[in-house]
Image: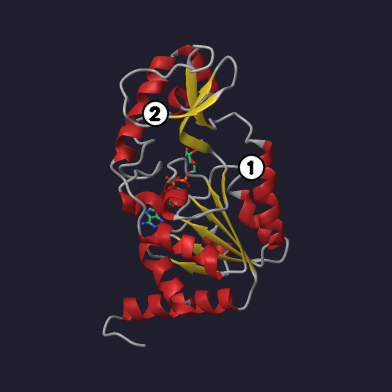
Amino acid sequence: MGTDDPVDDDLASLVEQAAERLRSVRRVCCMTGAGVSAESGVPTFRGVGGLWQGRRPETLATPEAFDADPEEVWRFYLWRRELLKECKPNPGHYALADLERIVPEFTLVTQNVDGLHPQAGSREVFALHGDIWIDRCTRCGHEARATGDDLTSIPRCGACGAMARPGVVWFGEVLPTDVLSGAQEAVARCEIMLVVGTSSVVQPAASLADWARANGASVIEINPEATPLTASADLAIRAPSGRVLPAIVQQLA
Ligand code: OAD
């Protein structure tokens, strides 16, 4: 299949190579980052227009920041919930849900807190950094799902009345043990690790691809930009995931 556009031809060839590799294995693990939701209108963190441009993560996404000024931290998360209310899964999310049905053993690991993977139909999702729609009590740990109906007041615990916090993992916090170990198990077992839409700079998520490779897996990266992972990836497809993932699924279906 050729087109008049050499860029499109290159992309089609890379997509075919990725599909060929995926066709020949049983166990695939996919790690996603903010980039997979970019085409849904969810801002990424780094780079132009990213959430960390003009904001300091240490004043908004650490336990110390929340202790010092919970209102300020909540304002940031309520604003992000407001943005997310308008966002729907994009073709990249749907393609990953399709892959879960096509590949015999497929596990999705995400750094995203936006909930768009389950919304698109992905079932087995290890959300390493939590879920922005969860309110977790700072006193009793009770968790409740926020509806987005009231994004003006700071959520309080339905069980004990204390202030809640967003159910996400902040810098300096440990990842939930069950989520991390489930993800690590999938990474250790996989034959191909897909790495989609992440700058691959935040640990421990960033090291999972290295770990997969150390266990014999090949790594396929999908990202319009180069990252610290690109040079060591077996295949790097420099294009948006909302375009690449559905094209791969089309080849496999
Ligand atoms: P980043 O904002 O660091 O990186 C987003 C990546 O997505 C970049 O490499 C972009 O090139 C890429 N990208 C942009 N548009 C894309 C598209 N259409 N298709 C595919 N890729 C695209 O986001 P993460 O790597 O997810 O943690 O950031 C990791 C963690 O750092 C986040 O979970 C968050 C953040 O601080 C916490 O808040 C704890």
What amino acid is at disc 1?
A: Val
Q: Is 201 located above or below residue 72 in the figure? A: below
Question: Are discs 1 and 2 less than 8 Å apart at CB?
Answer: no
Q: Which residue lies furthest to the bottom in this view?
A: 1
**Mark 2 crowd level (few <14, some 14–19, many ≥20, 10 Å Cα):** many
Q: Nearer the viewer, residue 252 or 21?
A: 252
Q: Is disc 2 placed on a helix, strand or loop?
A: helix
| Image spot of residue 110 (x, y percent) | 53, 48
Q: Is 218 located above or below residue 70 in the figure? A: below
Residue 228 visible in the shown view: no
Q: Which residue is drawn at 36% across and 37% down?
A: 51
Q: Which residue is drawn at 68% across and 37% down?
A: 177
Residue 199 circle label: none
Q: Indicate left or right for 227 with 209 as reference.
A: left
Q: Indicate left or right for 53 with 226 as reference.
A: left
* Residue indicated by mark 1: 179
Q: Quadrant of residue 234?
A: bottom right
Count all numbered tags in the image, as a single digit. Answer: 2
Residue 77 circle label: 2
Q: Which of 22 and 95 is in front in this view?
A: 95
| Image spot of residue 179 (x, y percent) | 64, 42
Q: Is disc 1 placed on a helix, strand or loop?
A: helix
Residue 146 visible in the shown view: yes
| Image spot of residue 233 (x, y percent) | 57, 65
Q: Quadrant of residue 214?
A: bottom right
| Image spot of residue 13 (x, y percent) | 43, 80
Q: Quadrant of residue 239?
A: bottom left
